[in-house]
Image (tube, rainbow, N blue to C red):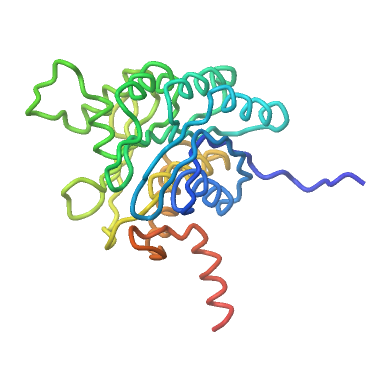
Amino acid sequence: MANTRETPPIVLTFAASDPSGGAGLQADILTLSSMGCHPLSVVTAITVQDTLGVEDVMAMEAEWVADQARCVLEDMPVGVFKVGLIGSVENVAAIAEVVADYPDIPLILDPVLASGRGDELAGDDILTALQEMLIPQTTLLTPNSLEARRIAQLDDDDGDAEPDLAECARRIIEMGCEFVLITGTHENTPQVVNTLYGESGVLRSDSWSRLPGSYHGSGCTLASAIAASIAHGLDIPEAVKEAQEFTWQALKAGFHPGMGQNIPDRLFWAREEEDAARD
């Protein structure tokens, strides 16, 4: 007899494998699963990294990236695309070509330009490719403030004056992106302020208490949580709100398994239920 159980929302993530389980593909899979989605995963690169930082990156061949995606897309109904670390210009082009065939599927792009330690993960060639090929197809871009400034920087900008974040968002939206959520972890503010921009300007601004320490995979968690929320039917502002709440709780419940950054606990709610059951 056929199984009549309803299929959970399906999200396809393009990301690099992180053997520490803190960021990248593993973070996406944990987050999407925790939020009730079925994750499909396309490996864009293999990394050598731990909680301290990224030692090396080996990008997959672009043909393999495209083939992984097209194989599952022809088999299952995907609700949302999520893109993280891409690894090469060729992979940007491959992903851009794949998603262009599915214009009705929302695309969440986390522009992973550097690791938490500052290791560069995307040179100017990859950044240019993102600006020209993928950002124009993006529903929501989720840069931190440093990434937003780098993406929005113009050749004729005064080298001593960085554009403010509202101007960065305006420029990025002019590239063709529908929405931009700029996160404020790197800003010198008492609280972390995350601001969602659309074509008309600020759509919402949320403030969060700063947590002690630093976290490996917080950006991946947030972008995947937004993708999951959209897959469940929320509109962009509500999905952003829901995802921030999930991410903050995951960070608050984070643990310190190695010598570097904390790792968010994307299954915090399950462990809370276990603890409550023991009491």
Q: Is residue 103 above or below residue 235?
A: above
Identified at 9% across, 28% down, the residue is 161
Give 139 or 39, whichever is nearer the viewer: 39
In the figure, residue 219 lies in which quadrant?
top left
Residue farthest to the right, as pictured = 1
Identified at 41% across, 19% down, the residue is 136
Identified at 9% across, 22% down, the residue is 158
The reply, left or right, for residue 266 in relation to residue 79 is left
The reply, left or right, for residue 88 in relation to residue 44 is left
Q: Position of residue 257 (x, y in %)?
A: 41, 65
Q: Position of residue 200 (x, y in %)?
A: 31, 25
Q: Is residue 125 above or below residue 275?
A: above
Residue farthest to the left, as pictured = 160
Q: Position of residue 167 (x, y in %)?
A: 21, 27
Q: Is residue 156 above or below residue 231?
A: above
Identified at 56% across, 71% down, the residue is 273
Q: Position of residue 45 (x, y in %)?
A: 49, 35
- Tag count: 0
Q: Quadrant where the C terminus lies?
A: bottom right
Q: Is residue 221 above or below residue 172?
A: below
The reply, left or right, for residue 83 in relation to residue 12 is left
